[in-house]
Amino acid sequence: MLKWFLSFIGVSASIGLWLGGGPAALAAATKDAPPNFVIILADDMGFSDPGCYGGEIQTPNLDRLAANGLRFTQFYNTARCWPTRSSLLTGYYAQQIGMDPPKGKLPPWTRVLPHYLKPLGYRCYHSGKWHLMGAPRSVVDGGFDHSYRFEDSDRYFLPSRHFEDDRPLPPVKPDSGYYATTAFADHAINYLQDHATNHAAEPFFLYLAFISPHFPLHALPEDIARYRDRYLAGWDVIREQRSQRLRQTGLLDCALPPLDPTFTPRYFKPEVLEQLGPGEAEHPVPWETLTAEQKTFQATKMAIHAAMVDRMDREIGRVVDQLRAMNALDNTVIFFLSDNGADATLMVRGEGHDRSAPPGSWRSFLCIGPGWASASNTPFRWHKIWTHEGGISTPLIVHWPKGIKARGEFRHDPGHVTDFAPTLLDLAGAHITNTWNGAAAPPLPGRSLVPAFHKDGAVEHDFIFFQHEGNRALRMGNWKVVSAQENRDQWELYDLAKDRSELHDLAAQQPDRALRMESRWKELETTFRSQYAPASPGRATSPKRPSP
């Protein structure tokens, strides 16, 4: 704590002056007691899975948060689990901190959110997935007062690698009644109850990081039963229904791209079809071309996926109830989002797949695959890993009764997970230095979302950068260039104001714009990777900030 405090009391500048909130935003945010923060992160949930984003899955708790708060329509993650978590927790693009691809060690100037919030008097809690490789994971070094860390994402029912405040917990035994989604909420609620009893005068930050609905498709039988026959209509019908609801609500108004029946999931190996059986489908072909066995098998998989999202929503409801019970809900800023788009992957890991086991049980290992991933990402193209809109677009719900007067409104401001650090620090009234562990840190690249809490169109980004496994993209204003790993030398250009579905490539019509944005992406990539170079201990360097 002393190290953190000393690093904060040196020469400092108001975060609002360079993060976008400004003095007025800070004054409004810190007029009374500082707000609490709860960030709830789903794993591999598609843009249109929640009911309030057009989905048919029952998510009444998320729907209520949205109805009494804000829904962002153009918010982005990084297209993959760990880069998103890295950016969210540190405030930097994953390339700046050596996390995409992972290099094993973070720069010495890297901080996670508790390192910023603890010196301001916040108690910090974590429950669920961590996935920030190279970062301190202990509750001491990571700044969390309590943590339930889960490192066994292939096992929703029987994890063997999970930790309470850094102490290894025994492997969960069969018939214990354990289910990861519920366990994450249980620990979060326990931390909040302890906070209410012993630290009620202090603000808190809770990071609740679910693994749901990431594969394997594991769900409780009673949850699966609620969706047993819902998806026999097929992914073509579900996509069209979701697209229509998005238009009717006014959340989005863009075309629904046709499915690509030749698309093959990344990492696909033909032998997986032998493991999973004749019901599996390698490509997102028209539903009517599937066999009866395939239709039943595929509908069952999506029923399990829906059950996982449904259960996550129920557990979120329990956490919200706890906030209400401790009289903290009114002044708690709740954020909900997903770490990437739905995943088209087909693979088997963990204990393998027993074809005789009930689908969704711990002895099964299923993935929703490309057909249903396309439905989950409605109305966008492509999936997790790719930087087309389907891979990087996420719902973002923001709920704060005390600080947000709007109820049920949309915010069309583009944003990115790097915006979380400046937003929380803006609301907390932070004053920070740009050094940590004796090394100079680059300025945070994100922008505070606080102005958007009050009106639409109040937050601007000079750029939003994407890169993952050879998939590249850059958004500047309403324009986006994107290049898929499969077409390394080809950049596409889209006007997202008119074509969010990325159906009309304008690169041939506007080659100069496409070339300028491609060159800008390359400049940023070079700058970000140069910033990663670890500084020598005790020597402060001056990392270069990308020009606007």
Image (cartoon, rainbow, N blue to C red):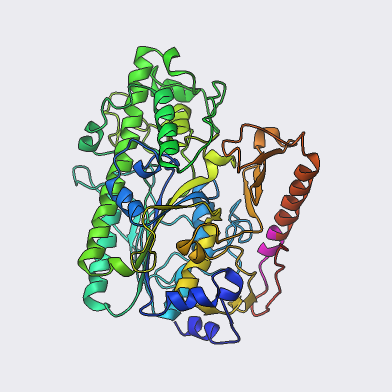
Q: Examine the structure image and report whether residue 514 is included in the region drawn in magenta.
A: no
Q: Is residue 109 visible?
A: no
The image shows residue 521, relative to residue 362, as above or below, that is below
Is 508 positioned to the left or the right of 13 in the image?
Answer: right
Q: Position of residue 245 (x, y in %)?
A: 40, 35
Is 381 positioned to the left or the right of 140 in the image?
Answer: right
For the residue pair 482 and 177, the one nearer the viewer reads as: 482
Quarter of the rendering occupied by the C terminus: bottom right
Total numbered labels: 0
Instruction: Locate residue 322: give its quadrant.
Output: bottom left
For the residue pair 195 and 155, the one nearer the viewer reads as: 195
Q: Look at 29% across and 61% down and name the residue there.
A: 188
Q: Look at 54% across and 54% down and name the residue there.
A: 413
Q: Position of residue 506 (x, y in %)?
A: 71, 35
Q: Look at 47% across and 79% down and name the residue there.
A: 27
Is 424 positioned to the left or the right of 122 in the image?
Answer: right
The image shows residue 266, relative to residue 279, as above or below, that is below
Q: Look at 75% across and 55% down and name the residue there.
A: 523
Q: Which residues are magenta?
A: 528-535
Q: Examine the structure image and report whether residue 529 is included in the region drawn in magenta.
A: yes
Q: What type of secondary structure mainly makes up the magenta span?
A: helix
Q: Position of residue 498 (x, y in %)?
A: 61, 39
Q: Is residue 265 visible?
A: yes
Quarter of the rendering occupied by the N terminus: bottom left
Instruction: Locate residue 458: give its quadrant.
Output: bottom right
Q: Position of residue 447 (x, y in %)?
A: 57, 64
